[in-house]
């Protein structure tokens, strides 16, 4: 088991800055997910930790040892790739045993270790097959077995589930979570899928353009995003953003989005005082917009959180329904409300009374995109 420390690490390819002075620590036994859109530097970060890419600047250490110049084979890490990188001409057994063969591990020990890992992953009966004769899920398990058999200090996963179909992905994801709970080996996991990040990570690092915007527990990212990038990336559908002004009316502060006007609760109003009379971006998650009178009955809502908007489109997803709303012209700002399965008849084009749960709203600086709260 080991701690991984990434300290002010930069990676440049010519003029391209793939990773820009990032720092984070993966604690011993922790499962940390690197998430962000394609091209933001996640894989490069993982590959520098694995030793597959040179570091341009900065320091990486594993288990208190600086590994910048250590070849991959001496870092005691095991990587699982997106395409599994299995040797097509070798059986499952030979693929799993390959590293040990190279290191001239005694035959009996190889047999024993492969059998044990195969049992843990329930792939005993496909060890004689070549990758071409395995399903996607089986190949994924063989790739995982090949990593596990090395008994590494750190696992590095590079989008290992993205070639699986949706259903298999969920079960493979749960297998990985269970495995981590059982063995507790330090792990870094790269994905562009925020759901995967939120369900798997003890902590999640949100990347964009080679930088880490925020690293924290899933609930921190969800409830307290530091900026609009994190707020918009975490959660499906993402947080709604509406242009607004902050207005003062006697002792209260209001969020005014032209045609949609709601009052800030006192504790949040205090933090928005400096924005009185100024432009801001109002953020509210789709699940915090309720169709009146539905509101969690354990809470009293404030009358000033009631507003109305036009229902532009209904998007039924089965267990939930997305209501695409629009504020009055000329601003016509779009936002989404999510409700459960729709049991009452709603018509596209009708006006809906909505209640915004303002205790859970966010405000952002329109210039810097950073969170005010
Ligand atoms: P992600 O894993 O988040 O999709 P990557 O780490 O693969 O992103 O890539 C980050 C950036 O670095 C991208 O702009 C990509 O084009 C660039 N990049 C990655 N590898 C190379 C390379 N070998 N040569 C030049 N540019 C590269």
Image: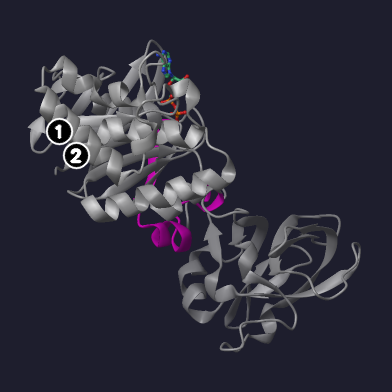
The residue located at (14%, 42%) in the rendering is 2
Point out the stretch of residues depicted in magenta.
210-232
- Report the side of 218 relative to 272 (left or right): left
Residue at horizontal 64%, vertical 63%?
A: 286
Q: Which residue is mark 2?
A: 4
- Pointer 2 local density, CA inside 10 Å: few below 14, some 14–19, many at least 20: many
Q: What is the crowding at mark 1: few (fewer than 14 residues within 10 Å), some, or many (at least 20)?
A: some
- The earlier-in-sequence mark between 1 and 2 is 2
Is residue 186 positioned above or below 336 on the image?
above
Q: Nearer the viewer, residue 73 or 352?
A: 73
* Callouts 1 and 2 close, C-beta under 8 Å: yes
Look at the image and say whether residue 223 sits in the magenta stretch: yes
Front-most of 35 and 268? 35
- Mark 1, residue position: 61
Q: CA distance from mark 1 to mark 2?
A: 6 Å
Secondary structure under the numbered disc 2 in the rendered image: strand
| Residue closer to the observer: 22 or 365 | 22
Instruction: Find residue 346 and report its horizontal and vertical position in percent.
Output: 87, 70
């Amino acid at each position: 088991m080991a701690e991984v420390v990434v300290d002010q690490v930069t990676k440049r390819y010519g003029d391209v800055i793939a990773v820009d002075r990032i720092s984070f620590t993966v604690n011993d036994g922790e499962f940390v997910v690197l998430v962000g859109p394609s091209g933001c530097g996640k894989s490069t970060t993982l590959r520098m930790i694995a030793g597959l890419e040179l570091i341009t600047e900065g320091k990486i250490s594993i288990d208190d040892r600086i590994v910048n110049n250590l070849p991959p084979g001496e870092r005691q890490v095991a990587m699982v790739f997106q395409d599994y990188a299995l040797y097509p001409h070798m059986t499952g057994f030979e693929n799993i045993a390959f590293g040990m063969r190279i290191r001239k591990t005694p035959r009996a020990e190889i047999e024993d270790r492969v059998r044990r890992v195969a049992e843990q992953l329930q792939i005993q009966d496909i060890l004689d097959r070549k990758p071409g004769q395995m399903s996607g899920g089986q190949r994924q398990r063989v790739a995982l077995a090949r990593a596990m058999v090395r008994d590494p200090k750190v696992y590095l996963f590079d989008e290992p589930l993205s070639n699986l179909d949706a259903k298999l992905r969920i079960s493979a994801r749960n297998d990985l979570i269970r495995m981590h709970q059982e063995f507790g080996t330090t792990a870094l996991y790269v994905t562009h899928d925020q759901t995967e990040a939120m369900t798997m990570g003890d902590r999640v690092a949100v990347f964009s353009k080679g930088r880490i915007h925020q690293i924290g527990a899933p609930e921190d990212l969800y409830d307290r995003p530091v900026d609009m990038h994190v707020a918009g990336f975490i959660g499906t559908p993402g947080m709604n953003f509406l242009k607004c002004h902050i207005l003062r009316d006697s002792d209260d502060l209001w969020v005014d989005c032209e045609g949609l006007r709601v009052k800030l609760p006192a504790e949040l109003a205090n933090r928005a005082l400096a924005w009185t009379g100024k432009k801001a971006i109002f953020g509210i998650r789709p699940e915090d917009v309720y169709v009146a009178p539905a509101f969690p009955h354990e809470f009293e809502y404030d009358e000033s959180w009631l507003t109305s908007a036009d229902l532009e489109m209904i998007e039924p997803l089965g267990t939930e329904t997305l209501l695409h709303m629009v504020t009055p012209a000329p601003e016509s700002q779009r936002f989404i409300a999510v409700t459960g399965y729709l049991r009452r008849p709603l018509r596209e084009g009708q006006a809906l009374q909505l209640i915004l749960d303002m205790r859970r709203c966010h405000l952002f600086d329109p210039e810097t995109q950073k969170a005010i709260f």
